[in-house]
Amino acid sequence: MMMYCIRISLFSQESGCKYVIKGRVLDSSHGSPLTHVEVEIIGQKNKRSNTDAEGQFIIDGLCAGQIELHISHEQCEHIHLHFQLLHDTSVTIVLKHIEQEFEGAKLSVKGEKQDKLSTISAKQLESRKGSSIASLMLDIGGVSLLKSGSNVSKPIVNGLHSNRVIIINNGIRQEGQNWGMEHAPEIDAFLANEIELLKGAESLRYASDGIGGVVLVKPSSIFRETAGLLRGELNIVGATNGRMGVISGFAGNKLSDKFPLYWRIQGTIKQGGNVKTPDYYLANTGVNEANYSANLAYKFKRLKTELFYSHFENKIGIFSGSHIGNLSDLQKAMNSDRPLISSGFTYDIKRPYQFVTHQLLKIKNDYLVNAQNSIEFIFSYQNNHRQEFDLLRSATAYAGPSFDYYIHTYMGDVVWVHNDFHRLSFKAGVFGMRQSNAYTGRFFIPGFYQKGLAAYFTANKSIGKMQYEAGIRYDIKQLEAYLWERSVLRINTLHFNNFTYVLQAYRQLGTRSKLGFLHSTSWRPPAPNELYANGLHQGLASIEIGDSSLRPERSFNQSLTYSLQKKSSSIEIEAYYQYINGFINLVPSLIPQLTIRGAFPVFKYEQNNAEIYGLNLMVKQDFKKYFFSKTTANILFGHNISNKHPLSQMPPLSGKTSLGFDNKKMSIQFTFQYTATQYRYVAGSDYKTPPKGYYLMGLELAFPFKIKRQDFKFNLSVSNLSNTRYRDYLNRFRYFADEQGFNLTARLIIPIHIQTNT
Amino acid sequence: MNNKKRTAFLGLLIITSLCNSCKDKGPQPGNEPKNETELITTVQLELTDSVLFTKSYAVFRDLDGDGGNNPSQFDSIKLSKQHTYLTRIYLLDESKTPADTISNDVLSEAKDHLFVFTPSGVDVKVKIEDKDDNNLPLGLLSIWRAISNGTGKMKLTLKHQPGVKNGTPEPGETDVEVNFNCIIN
């Protein structure tokens, strides 16, 4: 989204009937030229151009008269410009990001050089290529990772995760078995061009239940493809630990300006073997992944239509030492310094493992009514199939999956986008969804149908030094759970409806700093696992029991943000306080449950009032010409207000400092990271006391180079440089094994530009 | 124009192939979930008195497996002082009809399994009578001798030790662990 201001200077030139419009498109924050901006004369054939690397365009052969110039850029709203063409005309168009003016959690201006607390740019993603989608999010302020071993990770946002963090993949809410702590988001990390954490009014468009936050995983827009150029990229990644290799690439093109059909294909293949800690290999921690996607779009005069399909498939080995038969096995595994199952290196993945496929089909139509108004129609279908293969009790036992979940989700969305910078900009929309979830195998959660309808309105306005943003959303949800008990079916139907709102205000303090305040509320009905779970967690030797009488939880969130942007330094601070009424939490129960494998501790879902508050901080400083430092820190406290106990599984204090050198030809960065011990836990509520805090070091080196005419980018990064032995409190396998040791990753990025004749 | 047709055809092809890949619907919530995974629901001890030839049984039964309802039957083992018993273990999956005899699978994979008997508070001597192909003990068949009066526990453990069985209870993971009450009088 952008707002714009336009300066037109007319040069009176005596020429014939043929006039020329030329111009430059600049980014308002730095005055830097914007490439790939499409400029088009409405109603005249073939009168269009794309800006080049200098941001310049030229359209000639124009006749005098009323002219409508249409300017569009990736991730931007359309801009229409009307004027009387009487001379050769030169135009300077300054595109300014609306985000800078309004958007909630975003504080700083957008630009390549700026690092932001809530966004991860394409450039930052470059140095993380080959990592899982969740680990890409790690650089966002307040984000930590909930891990189950080395291959399964999902984001924790300000202490909350799973059902409370909504991931929007390519504009569509990701619908898998999100509830599971060991279920990672099923997204090809190479599709992400930018990742952003939304907390403001904009998030209401996507969800009302993002109590932790809404994370947008944004691909690069298909409409940035240009005619006459086949654009692509090939990524080759190799890592020493796990001997992992990844190849990923894409290619795209616009057929011609006459026939504006856009296409892009993309694919990724990944294979990794057993991961190594400083002292030993972790048995069965290999991973295989194969993904592909296809994107097709057509641009009519006022209608942009887009079809997107992606297929994600992965097989993840689950560390064998974590699957235990019963509590005595668990005690034995925990008391041993080394995992009881030793292993060497192999790519083979044996039981236990997960096999997950996720397909997304999306159709999006964007109709431009006039310069201020457009309507978006989005329809999507997702098919998620998760299979979990536990250890076999015997070689003759049933060799299929122990769990087999099928989840189908249909969603539809109609949004009216109104953009009028000087007055009021708003979005109004309706959303509907239908989902079915069924399973075979061992019972953990029941099958269900889920339906939802919602209407929302978000708006922003700026008055003097103040900027306001507000949104409201109303949701109607229905859950129909199918509970089978020995061939007898019981259907429980639950209805939930409620509203959500966001209020935000920013005040510009001078030209460089800004103060922001946010107050929002969101709610979340209890999820099927919280209501009906009744089963054993193989990995944690515990029985989880749901409570069908749970009511929705409601959160009230307040945050204060301050940002300062100077030429050579920037500061961002976010302080937040969140109160959650009826926070649904797993609480240890006193009476263990007897099974054929002995007594297991029981954890029950309970509701309490909780509060979470903390501080996220980022300070960046440039020294001399080429040196920079960047420091981030996150501190968080979580309490159960009812009994004054700390909440479990909350991220401990952590901080990170990088020192670097960047002269555009080469960049080197040294990172020092500290994670404290989590002292805030209820004694006796965990099998083991939280692991000790740890220091880690990392190193990164990146430079571009050229062979003949071909550009390359090379990137080398080392994590856990000192091969430190440590365990992480937020890794569910901390009871059994150390974290990954030294790892060197090399990445070669080959941009492809082939001129095609059209 | 030709170009247009070609792309339209390509588009159609892509869409139809996409629709095909979405066809695999799997089960629906209204279908009764199949569970083909093997479950051990029942441990049955058959104790045959070596003198009187009378048979007594002690059963642990939990039909819905881990979690869910509590075990529906959990007997105590009753032994007579100075008697010797031939003990046979049956493992059943009674969630299926007819019930599946899992102990037959254990027998056929004897070299991967070991039963462990751990008395506590009662004086019972246990000697495993059956052996696997590697001449290591199995435990489906054992001889128990009750020494003196007392009340305590007899813990029965089935260890699954594929490739690592060495005759000791240490390696492997636990498939069954039932701690029976045991009374000798």
Image (tube, grey):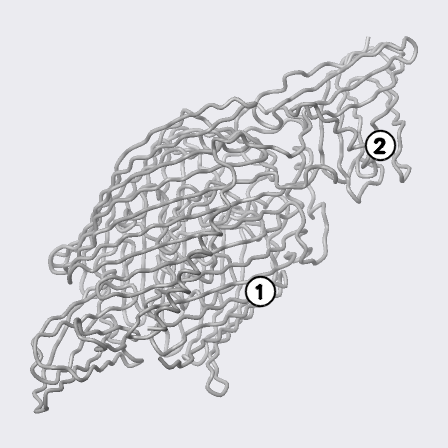
Q: Position of residue A107 (x, y in %)?
A: 28, 59
Q: Amino acid at mark 2?
A: Leu
Q: Amino acid at mark 1?
A: Leu
Q: Position of residue A290 (x, y in %)?
A: 54, 59
The residue to which callout 2 is attached is B138
Mark 2 burial class by Cα count in 10 Å: few <14, some 14-19, many 20+: many
Comparing A107 with A67, the one in front is A67
Q: How many marks?
A: 2
Relative placement, left or right, of A19 versus A351 is left
**Where is the N terminus of chain A found, in terms of image quarters?**
bottom left
Mark 1 burial class by Cα count in 10 Å: few <14, some 14-19, many 20+: some
Relative placement, left or right, of A74 versus A21 is right
On the same chain, marks 2 and 1? The answer is: no
Comparing A173 with A703, the one in front is A173
Relative placement, left or right, of A403 versus A68 is right
Q: Mark 2 to mark 1: distance in Å?
A: 49 Å
User: Tag 1's secondary structure?
Assistant: loop
Q: Is residue A585 above or below residue A727?
A: above
Q: Is residue B45 above or below residue A253?
A: above
Which disc is residue A224 wearing? none
Look at 27% across and 40% down and name the residue there: A454
Q: Is residue A748 above or below residue A89?
A: above
User: Tag 2's secondary structure?
Assistant: loop
